[in-house]
Image (cartoon, helix red, strand yellow):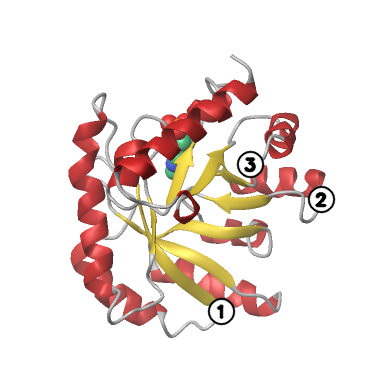
Amino acid sequence: MSLKDRIDGVEQRIGEACRRSGRKRGDVLLVAVSKKFPLDMILEARRLGLQDFGENYAQELRDKQKEAGDGAVRWHFIGALQRNKVKYVVGKADLVHAVDNMALVAELDKRAAAAATRVRALVEINGGEDSKNGIRGSGLREFLEGASGFRNVLLEGLMMMPPYFEDPEMSRPWFSGLREMRDKVSGEFPGIQELSMGMSNDFEVAIEEGATILRVGSAVFGPRPK
Ligand SMILES: *Cc1c(COP(=O)(O)O)cnc(C)c1O
C-alpha cells in the first residue's frame, strides 16, 4: 500500500468516527508518529497534506528538525523526556505531550526562559500498572497547581498511553476516564482542554470518547523499522 493510500484510509476512518460521534473533523488533530521513519517519508507525508509529526527520541527530533529546516513541519515530542534532553526539544517541538514530574516542568521553564519562548505541554496520566510513566489522576490537581507557578510552561491538556489491547473497545474506559479527569479539573484550570489519546489500533474509539489529538504511527507509515 502506498503512503497516500494509508493516509487516505486513516483520514476516512477519522471522518467516519467524527460523524458517528457528532464531532467536527477540525476539532481532532492527527499527529503522524514518525519515530524511526526517515525524513524523506515525513516530507512526502507533508506533501500529501499532513502537518504534524510526533517523535519520541529527543536527539532524533533535533536531527530531523535541523535537516528539514525551520517551519517545514510541526513537531510534537511524544516520548518520555529526560531533563538532560530538554534542550533538544525547547523551541523545536510545538507541543510536548508527556510531562509527568515537577523537575521536568522546572527545566522546561528554565530553558524556555533562556530561549525567550514558551513551551506548550500536556500532562501525562499513568496508563496502567505496567507503565512507570505518568502521574496518578489523584495527584493531578496538586500537580497543576504546582506547575502553574512556572510561567514559561503552558499546560494545555492531558495525555495517556493505556495498555495495549487487541480489542480497541478495551481502551474505551481508559479514554473516557481521561476525559472525565479533564472535565473535573478544567473549571479550576481552564487551560486544560486537550486530550492526546488514541493510536493506530484504537484511534476511532478515542475520537468517540473525546480525543482532540491522535498519535497514529503504523496506520500512517506502515510497519516501523526496528
Ligand atoms: C509509537 C507511539 C505511538 C504510535 O504508535 P502506533 O501504534 O504505531 O500508532 C503513539 N504514542 C506514543 C507515545 C508512541 O510512542
> In terms of sequence position, does the residue under pointer 2 or pointer 1 come before the other?
2
Name the side, left or right, on which 72 lies relative to 61.
Answer: right
- Contact between marks 3 and 2 (CB within 8 A): the answer is no
Residue displayed at 37% across by 51% down = 23
Q: Nearer the viewer, mark 1 or mark 3?
A: 3
Q: Earlier in the sequence, mark 1 or mark 3?
A: 3
Q: Amino acid at mark 3?
A: Leu
Q: Which residue is mark 2?
A: 69
Would residue 138 appear left or right of 164 to someone viewing this image? left
Identify the residue position indicated by label 1 in the image. 152
| Contact between labelled residues 1 and 2, with CB atoms less than 8 Å apart | no
The answer, for residue 80, to whether it is visible in the render is: yes
Give me the disc on residue 50.
3
The part of the image, by quadrant, that contains residue 43 is top right
Alpha-carbon distance for marks 1 and 3? 28 Å
Q: Position of residue 35 (x, y in %)?
A: 58, 36
> What is the three-letter code of the residue carrying label 2?
Gly
Q: Give the SS element for disc 2.
A: loop
Q: Quadrant of the N terminus?
A: top right
Real-space CA distance between mark 2 and mark 1, rounded to the nearest whole angstrom: 24 Å
Label 2 environment density (alpha carbons within 10 Å; few <14, some 14–19, many ≥20): few
Q: Return the residue nearer the eye: 133 or 4.
A: 4
Q: Is residue 98 above or below residue 42?
A: below
Task: Please state the quadrant of the image where ligand 1 appears.
Answer: top left
